[in-house]
Image (spheres, helix red, strand yellow):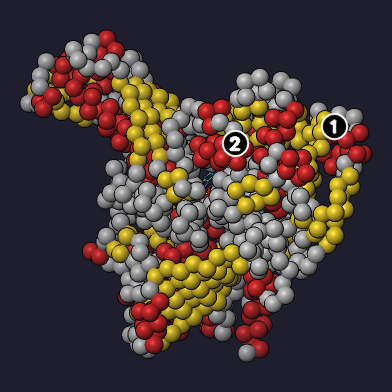
């Protein structure tokens, strides 16, 4: 029997991403790479108006164009009861317009043709009779008396208000404020931004008229959930729906929702009996698919004279667009925004939120955030810095004074979260040390004397990821639990099938490492499969950094299940009692006689060839994991900037990022995730924003108006880590995919405000374009 000693590349190894072999060879398999026999092409006509009554559509000229097979309108969809669909927030959303358009870029009609260019050309031949209506582009306009009613088709909807939501204890918070020595407040707007994945959204819908089988290849972060939603929307039997999400060219939250295009393409395929492909162009993606943020927030902090925080009050208006289509756990209207007390020991807090319809694209929450934690993190970290300056303490010292301390975990927050573990002071200390904080403050003071503006910004964020425990977390009633299925074949090679869906996070590599750690099979001997609803266990998909907390846990648990059986088999092979068998790194040995050993490969072979009487053959299993709690990764980011007061131009000198995501499965992949998030956080802080003019025209519909940071603008990042394992996760890991996008915007902005504070600047809303910075300086000078 083999006595293999090669180190197992399990948890903690920077294994190279197996997915990259196919990507760097140009051999990925994206939606547009899929070609089916007889395939037709769909293009979508979108509304130029933000709000307009639809008086009629004349599609005769388009229909007559050679190569055009069909023009699909809302009227046709309505005949099949598909003109409207449910959203992930339990609202309804138009698939194709029947009554009026409610945002610029909304789907008005679709052309199906034999060629994608013919389909596009035909759009121009469709004559639509619009009657423009008054437009609402902000919550303030939405609630104004006499505002146009956007959702006039909804029974009982008499205004543009969607929901009012509260969390925490109002009474005790009011008392804390009444008794406070100081109250510090901040009004801030977190602007609408967009995930902008490299690959836009699209699908190939293939409904077989003979068998009724519907196979839909689509850009989805959650194929299992989407299959169920399709069954509910289209009334198709669920076993005949197969959702395949092949390689995904970035998701960042943008590929969680069901978009009208998917539904129209599926309906068209059903009606025409041909596969139908639909691929968005860049502008369509930017103007019509899931946006992020658009939160108008007001925060207040109650303080004792010595700087101890005693209460937090936050209210916000959410701009939801024309349909309330946020992807979020059903019970939380503003996602997990109520984590807003962040890393601080806040005795009491109260959060209230109101959602409004506006004439803008629906589908909020997207963009690397655990359901609105990004807005919350930004609010508290900006407020903390302003509060520190107003009471005259250094922001690092102020944080130290108020952090939840290491021995307070598990910590129950004022709004009902139970933080699993943390060491906020440890992470901040490391960041301060790496950046050279004390020295920098001295240099800053010297530079100020010379008129140079240096700014140092900190953010000590707390994330909340891994939705979630079945008691509180569901989407449309479906509990947010996830599965992993593992089969070890006779030669000791394995297949792991998971319910998460990688869009660049490297699951094919990291989940194999979890099995490697637990079973001692090398990661390259484990094939990880995902993204096909017919062939993977049920689960709610990849977003909100939930894959490691949920599917990662399921993977560890299913591996342990197999290990238990493997131990029995080993005992059988070694002819000892099961209690005398020890396991380490893929070897089962006899207690006290380490030379007597069998490997996991020997055991796997025996599972099919030589198993004891009464034992089932095979070595496989499936586990569904119901997390006992969320995980709470955290960290401190420190950013150093220089601001040119004459022009408002600012430049990043240093970015030090200390992250703690518990046990790191693959340190290199974690570093990659953090680099990506810091880059996106910089983009949001510095340049990205989707705005609308008063007519509801979307400004930011292309990459000239919607600026993404390129390698040229992106700063260099210096990373550091601390490791505080999650006590309830089987391998002690917490999610990390979004941490840097959640935590870093406040650090960048805090740095710029830090530089400008002595001039009297108290806040600038993102993005901090040089124009806005310059204006803020001028306004502060003018008093
Ligand atoms: N990981 C690890 N050790 C940990 C935590 C995570 O090695 N302690 C690894 C994981 O195994 C996984 C990766 O890091 O390979 C990210 O894991 P996790 O934090 O669980 O997040 P998810 O896999 O659920 O990814 C979702 C998250 C989100 S919500 C967005 S948005 C986002 C992001 O990941 N979109 C991305 N990162 C992205 N990265 C790429 N390249 N493309 C996207 O679309
Ligand atoms: Cu909210 S972006 Mo990620 O959760 O898919």
Label 2 CB sits under 8 Å from any ligand 2 atom:
no
Question: Considering the image in quadrants, where does the N terminus appear?
Answer: top left
In this view, the residue in front, 773 or 446, is 773
Say the numbered circle drawn on residue 235: 2
* Residue 442 % position (x, y): 43, 77
Circle 2: element type: loop
Which circle's residue, 1 or 2, is located before the other in the chain? Answer: 1
Point 62% across, 31% down: residue: 216
Identify the image quadrant of residue 52: bottom right
Crowding at label 1, few (<14), some or many (≥20) Cα neighbours within 10 Å? Answer: many
| The C terminus - image quarter | bottom right
Residues 83 and 457: in front is: 83
> In the rendered view, would you say 398 is above or below 748?
below
Q: In this view, does 104 lie to the left or right of 766?
A: right
- In the picture of the structure, the residue carrying the numbered disc 1 is 68
Q: Residue at x 65, y 51 (%)?
A: 93
Q: Which residue is drawn at 68% across and 56% down?
A: 361
Q: Nearer the viewer, residue 715 or 116?
A: 116
Identify whether 193 is placed above or below 56: below
**92 sits to left or right of 239:** right
Q: In the image, 566: left or right of 183? A: left
Residue mark closest to the camera, 1 vs 2: 2
Check whether the beta carbons of the residues at disc 1 and disc 2 lie within 8 A of each other: no
Residue 582 visible (yes or no): yes
Which quarter of the figure has residue 767?
bottom right
């Amino acid at each position: 029997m083999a006595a293999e000693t090669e180190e197992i590349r399990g948890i903690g190894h920077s294994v190279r991403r197996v997915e990259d072999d196919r990507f760097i060879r140009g051999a990925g398999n994206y939606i547009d790479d899929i070609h089916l026999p007889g395939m037709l092409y769909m293009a979508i006509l979108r509304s130029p108006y933000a709000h307009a009554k639809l008086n009629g559509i004349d599609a005769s000229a388009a229909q007559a164009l050679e190569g055009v097979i069909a023009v699909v309108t809302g009227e046709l969809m309505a005949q099949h009861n598909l003109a409207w669909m449910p959203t992930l927030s339990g609202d309804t959303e138009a698939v194709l317009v029947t009554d009026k358009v409610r945002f610029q870029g909304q789907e008005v009609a679709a052309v199906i043709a034999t060629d994608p260019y013919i389909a596009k050309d035909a759009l121009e031949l469709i004559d639509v009779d619009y009657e423009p209506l008054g437009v609402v582009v902000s919550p303030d306009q939405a609630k104004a008396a006499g505002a146009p009613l956007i959702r006039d088709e909804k029974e009982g909807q008499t205004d543009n208000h969607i929901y009012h939501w509260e969390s925490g204890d109002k009474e005790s918070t009011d008392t804390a404020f009444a008794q406070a020595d100081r109250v510090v407040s901040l009004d801030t707007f977190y602007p609408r931004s967009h995930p902008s994945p490299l690959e836009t959204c699209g699908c190939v819908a293939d409904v077989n008229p003979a068998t009724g089988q519907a196979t839909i290849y689509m850009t989805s972060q959650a194929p299992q959930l989407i299959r169920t939603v399709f069954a509910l929307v289209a009334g198709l039997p669920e076993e005949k729906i197969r959702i395949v999400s092949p390689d995904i060219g970035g998701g960042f939250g943008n590929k969680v929702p069901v978009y009208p295009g998917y539904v129209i393409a599926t309906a068209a395929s059903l009606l025409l009996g041909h596969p139908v492909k639909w691929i968005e162009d860049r502008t369509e993606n930017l103007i019509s698919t899931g946006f992020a943020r658009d939160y108008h927030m007001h925060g207040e902090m109650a303080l004792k004279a010595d700087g101890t925080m005693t209460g937090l009050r936050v209210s916000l208006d959410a701009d939801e667009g024309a349909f309330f289509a946020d992807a979020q756990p059903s019970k939380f209207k503003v996602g997990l925004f109520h984590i807003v007390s962040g890393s601080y020991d806040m005795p009491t807090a109260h959060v209230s939120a109101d959602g409004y319809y506006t004439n803008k694209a629906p589908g909020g929450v997207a963009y690397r955030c655990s359901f609105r934690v990004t807005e919350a993190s930004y609010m508290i970290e900006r407020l903390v810095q302003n509060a520190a300056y107003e009471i005259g303490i250094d922001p690092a010292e102020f944080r130290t004074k108020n952090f939840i301390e290491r021995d307070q975990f598990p910590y129950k927050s004022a709004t009902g979260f139970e933080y699993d573990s943390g060491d906020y002071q440890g992470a901040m200390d490391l960041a301060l040390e790496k950046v050279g904080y004390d020295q920098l403050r001295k240099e800053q003071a010297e530079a100020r004397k010379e008129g140079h503006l240096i700014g140092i910004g900190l953010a000590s964020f707390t994330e909340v990821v891994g939705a979630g425990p079945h008691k509180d977390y569901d989407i449309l009633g479906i509990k947010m639990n996830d599965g992993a299925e593992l089969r070890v074949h006779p030669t000791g090679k394995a297949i792991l099938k998971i319910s998460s869906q990688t869009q660049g996070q490297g699951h094919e590599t990291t989940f194999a490492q979890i099995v490697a750690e637990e079973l001692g099979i090398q990661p390259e001997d484990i094939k990880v499969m995902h993204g096909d609803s017919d062939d993977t266990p049920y689960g709610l998909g990849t977003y909100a950094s939930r894959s490691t907390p949920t599917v990662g846990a399921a993977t560890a648990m299913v591996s342990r299940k197999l290990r238990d059986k493997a131990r029995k088999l080993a005992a059988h092979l070694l002819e000892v009692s099961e209690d005398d068998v020890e396991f380490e790194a893929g070897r089962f040995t006899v207690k006290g006689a380490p030379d007597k050993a069998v490997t996991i490969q020997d055991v796997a072979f025996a599972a099919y060839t030589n198993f004891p009487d009464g034992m089932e053959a095979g070595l496989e299993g499936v586990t569904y994991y119901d997390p006992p709690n969320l995980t709470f990764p955290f960290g401190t980011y420190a950013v150093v900037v220089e601001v040119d007061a004459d022009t408002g131009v600012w430049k990043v000198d240093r970015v030090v990022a200390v992250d703690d995501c518990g046990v790191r499965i693959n340190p290199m992949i974690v570093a990659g995730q953090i680099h990506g998030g810091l880059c996106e956080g910089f983009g949001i802080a510095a340049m990205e924003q989707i705005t609308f003019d008063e007519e509801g025209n979307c400004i930011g519909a292309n990459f000239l108006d919607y600026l993404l940071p390129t390698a040229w603008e992106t700063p260099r990042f210096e990373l550091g880590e601390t490791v505080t394992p999650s006590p309830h996760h089987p391998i002690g890991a917490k999610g990390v995919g979004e941490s840097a996008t959640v935590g870093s915007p406040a650090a960048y902005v805090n740095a710029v405000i830090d530089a400008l504070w002595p001039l009297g600047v108290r806040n600038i809303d993102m993005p901090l374009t040089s124009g806005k910075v310059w204006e803020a300086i001028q306004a502060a000078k003018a008093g």
